Amino acid sequence: MVSPRIAEAVLAEVGVDNAVVDISHKASRADLYKAFEKWASEHDSEQYTTDQLVEIAGFSYPTVLKFIDGNPHFHKVKKGLYECRNAKLRREQALRGDK
């Protein structure tokens, strides 16, 4: 026997006419990390505070600190201030002799 509470939850999700209402794919943490690194590479040489990075990434403060520590897409300028880096772009510029 299914409890009425569970039946209501299932019917609310599936719908009365057996059509699925909305099942959205939740992005994996790896996908979110890749999106954050992509964002950082698009903002080369721009500086952001840790609080700004937390807001942009959508992760908790400790998670962002752990992620950016030692990550080549971020360079620590001073405590609480980080610079975004695009290593591929910088290599290409170095080969061309650009600054």
Image: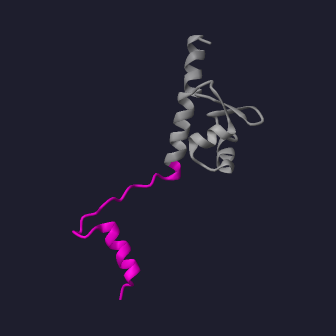
Q: Quadrant of the N terminus?
A: bottom left
- Total count of labels: 0
The answer to whether 62 is drawn above or below residue 68 in the figure is below
Left or right relative to 3: residue 78: right
The answer to whether 18 is drawn above or below residue 60 in the figure is below
Query: Where does the image place residue 73, in percent across and percent down from the top left?
Result: 61, 34
Query: Where does the image place residue 68, in percent across and percent down from the top left?
Result: 66, 41
**Location of residue 5 by image quarter:** bottom left
The answer to whether 91 is drawn above or below residue 31 in the figure is above
Q: Quadrant of the C terminus?
A: top right
Front in this rendered view, residue 14 or 44: 14
Left or right relative to 94: residue 6: left
Query: Where does the image place residue 45, in percent across and percent down from the top left?
Result: 63, 24
- Residue found at the far top of this picture: 97
**Location of residue 65 by image quarter:** top right
Front in this rendered view, residue 55 or 65: 55
- Residue found at the far right of this picture: 79
Question: Residue drawn at (55%, 37%), measured in percent from left and top?
Answer: 37
Assess whether residue 62 is covered by the magenta stretch.
no
The answer to whether 72 is drawn above or below residue 25 in the figure is above
Question: Residue drawn at (34%, 69%), measured in percent from left and top?
Answer: 12
- Residue found at the far left of this picture: 17
Query: Where does the image place residue 36, in percent across and percent down from the top left?
Result: 55, 40
Q: Which residues are magenta?
A: 1-30
Question: Residue drawn at (25%, 70%), measured in percent from left and top?
Answer: 16
